[in-house]
Image (cartoon, grey):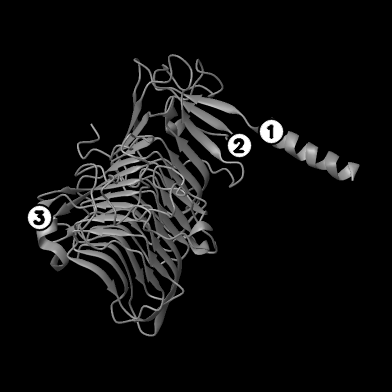
Amino acid sequence: MKKVLLTVAIILWAASAHAATRYIDCAVSSSGDGQSWAAAWKNFDNISGLGAGDTVYISGSASCSTYAVNGWTPINGTISNPITYRIGQDAGHNSPITIINSANPWLKGQGGNVVGVVIDGNYNGTRSITVTGSTIAAGNANGFKLRYINLDSPMQVGTYQNGEMDHIYVDLGSNDNHFYASSASAGDIGYTSNLIHDSTFRLRHYTPLGTGDDGFQWIENASFWNNSWIGVSDGNTSFVNHQDGIQTSGSYVAIYNNYFENMSNSAIFGEFYGNGSHWRIYNNVFNYSDPIIINAGSSSGTYSIGLGCHGSGLTLSDIIVANNTIVYGGVGISLGGYSGCVAVNSSYVVNNIIYGVGNVLDLKNYNGVLSNNATSASNINFVSSSDFHLTSISTAAIDSGINPSYLTAVYTKDKDGISRSQGSAWDVGAYEFAGNSGNKTAKPMAPTSLRLN
């Protein structure tokens, strides 16, 4: 046993000893060996000799805040020991930077794959790296993580595994995909292979036709939480895709504590070409304030949550759609759509508020539980037209929900992180009512005026 422990200790020490810190600073007069700020590499194409676990700090300063890049292939790390490219953290090197790309793609995989690469713009909780110009990634991605970055470029990969998008702000202008993975996360099973959280995605659309940017296409084995998807009206008529926030045929997808605004087609679109299963959709707010989308209603194909089948003889199972708040829009919740779904089994549509929606529930071949949903405006009242916390007169929602084990095994808090065990029963919708005196603070919705400038 002592020999085994000693061997493990040596391995860990060797891994730690290998990890190096390097520097890149476009203010230096000529490129050095990267081992200090004074001898920093001058640009990304000067980087060399990195190993798994290394960190490269990128300088931002009054002397240099812009890096011009003509394509970049980062050196790969490993899944457990990635190479991290991070904004400088010390005084004189921690100002925001912009990376301007002239090649497409800007970042592509070493040998066709991006493995164990982290790009981190976090300085003191702010996004301090902006990437502009062209596609973020190509090839397969495993352990590719983006943190605290502003993007106006799409990310397109083959397979996507062990990925993370943390505090990302995306505004593409007039492109058709924010994120595209041709075969999602092959080989993984579970909700936590890919993590997308605390981010804002602005998707442009041409209304009333419903075409525009797609957010995420074909990702699976993923969890989305604390994000905002904002639909923005755009006069561009050249969009090809329908605008969907999340569109995938994959399984093991958890979507919770998010905010969706004015998606002109579907906010959440499960489009299955085989059997679909293991979805968790809860504590989300869907807000349709654009009168063009509201007036178009179901005729524009506007769905808050839509899961359906292409093909024949297909089934959906183990789907939870619970404690969501849907305000206006065309169709509230649709399960089993298209002609291919012969059954929706072992599924639950409970505790949802569906307020002022044209077609509240569209359930086909549904064999699951349908219970305790507030499907009209009667006895439902919100704090304001942009704050969907309940007021005390919302008697159709307060203490009107259920909390069976199939829910409590997944979540026990509301969108604000407040315990749902405050009254005699759970409340319906994304938020628990905690009294008009305000012993909880409403989280502000993402303002639609946010722009990448």
User: Label 2 neighbourhood size at 10 Å, few (<14), some (14-19), many (20+)?
Assistant: many
Q: Is residue 243 left or right of residue 280?
A: left
CB within 8 Å, label 1 to label 2:
yes
The residue where tag 2 is placed is: 53
Residue farthest along the right direction in this orientation? 2
- Residue 169, by quadrant, is top left
Give whichever of discs 1 and 3 has the lower sequence position.
Answer: 1
Tag 3 secondary structure = helix
- Residue 28, by quadrant, is top left
Mark whose residue sits in front, 2 or 3 = 3
Give the distance between the C-alpha atoms of the residues marked 1 and 3, in whole angstroms: 57 Å
Residue 200 image label = none
Give whichever of discs 1 and 2 has the lower sequence position.
Answer: 1
Q: Identify the residue at image location x=48%, y=46%.
A: 144
In this view of the protein, can residue 395 be seen by the observer?
yes
**Residue 77: x, y in percent?**
57, 43
Q: Identify the residue at image location x=52%, y=41%.
A: 75
Tag 2 secondary structure = loop
Q: Identify the residue at image location x=52%, y=54%.
A: 193
In this view of the protein, can residue 207 be seen by the observer?
no
**Residue 417: x, y in percent?**
44, 43
Q: Amino acid at mark 2?
A: Gly
Q: Identify the residue at image location x=44%, y=53%.
A: 424
Give the distance between the C-alpha atoms of the residues marked 2 and 3, in whole angstroms: 51 Å
* Residue 163 vertical placement versus 184 (above, below): above
**Residue 318: x, y in percent?**
47, 70
The residue where tag 3 is placed is: 292
